[in-house]
Amino acid sequence: MNPISSLTSLFAQAPAAIENGFWFPAPSSTIAAEVDWMFYFILWINIVFFVLILAVMVYFMVVYRRKDMNLPPTSTSHNNTLEVTWSVLPSLLVLLIFYWGFTGFLDLRDAPANSYEIKVTAKKWNWTFTYPNGYADSDLHVPMDRPVKLIMGSDDVLHSLYIPAFRVKQDVVPGRYTSLWFNANRQGEFQLFCTEYCGTKHSEMLAKVTTHPSGEFERWLDQAVMKLDELPPVELGGLMYKRRGCSGCHSIDGVAGTGPSFKGTFGTEQAFADGSKHVIDENYIRESIIEPTAKVRAGFRPVMPTYKGQLRDKQIDGLIEYIKSLKN
């Protein structure tokens, strides 16, 4: 840890006692205090210099205002001390800010070796967080006081994951993996945003981050898997519809969106973009989940990403049963 980090870490020992501030939510990760101190350091430098320059400017306007427009201009010699001061002092401040920011950036890029890894998949317009045991959720759950590394990828366009309370943000890019890490040190529920405009429902691409005390995270994960496996097929399908982003494009009220509505479509014959017609049955739904561009409904674009390898057979069966239940 660099010297500045050592200083700011002293103020991060009791994060639960710090409430939301004017500028930021309460710092809730080990890196948050350092980010805040750097922000306030730069803010106060700007305030001090703004007031100082404004005061000097007003003073010169009052004291040295021209009283007789007929007086010839006078020439004054320069002041070496003043010129060196206003050149060297700002340069030193800029170098200090650069060092502080660069070392903090390196700390944020270098995740500890013992980090708990969670895979993040972004797509229009939802997040999917997949844990090492294969369980996937639309909200993020993490253990407290343990480094967590998010390995992120996008299925469609550019997104950006931002957790204000943790002071971490990273673009999620299609065709490659990006990552970020944090160590949450405050229990609670926090907001996660997408901060890269990604389409019409960008503002709805939200998720919750829940931090679990030591020992409780593992218990929550085991219970979540057990609860998922015990759900009836229709309830499981409804949960997948919400968690895996189906609701972002497919409505259940009959109104078409980016994709066709699920309501009342099962068992009907529909036209496709290639001019053919097909009955919406179990095989078609399964194929559309795994190979969504194989048969595209007429009037819609082939923009749905594949869920191949992301859903288990039981979850696909649940989605089929859920769609079958949405009758007119």
Image: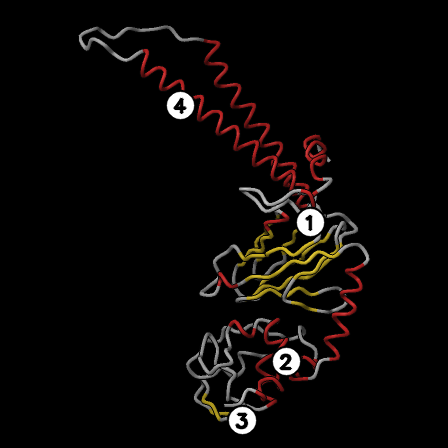
Question: Mark 2 near mark 3, Cβ–Cβ under 8 Å?
Answer: no
Image depth: mark 2 or mark 3 in front: 2
Q: Earlier in the sequence, mark 1 or mark 4?
A: 4
Up the image or down, 314 lies above or below 116; here it is: below
The tag earlier along the polypeptide, 3 or 4, is 4
The quarter of the rendered structure image containing the N terminus is top right
- The count of marks equals 4
**What whole-number distance in Å separates the C-alpha atoms at marks 3 and 4?**
74 Å
Report the residue marked by disc 2.
Answer: 237
Q: Residues within 10 Å of mark 2 (few under 14, many from 20)?
A: many
The amino acid beneath tag 3 is Gly
Q: CA distance from mark 2 to mark 3?
A: 18 Å
Vertical arrangement, residue 207 with respect to residue 147, above or below: below
| Amino acid identity at mark 4 | Leu
Question: What is the secondary structure assignment of the residue under circle 4?
Answer: helix
- The structure residue drawn at horizontal position 43% and vertical position 8%, both measured from the top left corner, is 79
Secondary element under disc 2, as helix, strand or loop, is helix
Q: Nearer the viewer, residue 217 or 195?
A: 217
Residue depicted at x 67% and y 47%: 28
Q: Residue at x 46, y 86 (%)?
A: 272
Q: CA distance from mark 2 to mark 1?
A: 33 Å
Q: Which mark is residue 267?
A: 3
Residue occupied by mark 4:
54
**Other residues around mark 4 within 10 Å, as few (<14) / some (14–19) / many (≥20):** few
Q: Where residue 182 is drawn, which disc sits there? A: 1
Q: How far across and down, in percent of the image, does residue 301 sit?
A: 45, 76
In the picture shown, does residue 230 fall above or below 39? below
> Which kind of residue does numbered mark 2 sit on?
Gly
Q: Nearer the viewer, residue 137 or 253?
A: 253
Q: Secondary structure at mark 1?
A: strand
Looking at the image, which is closer to me, 130 or 264?
264
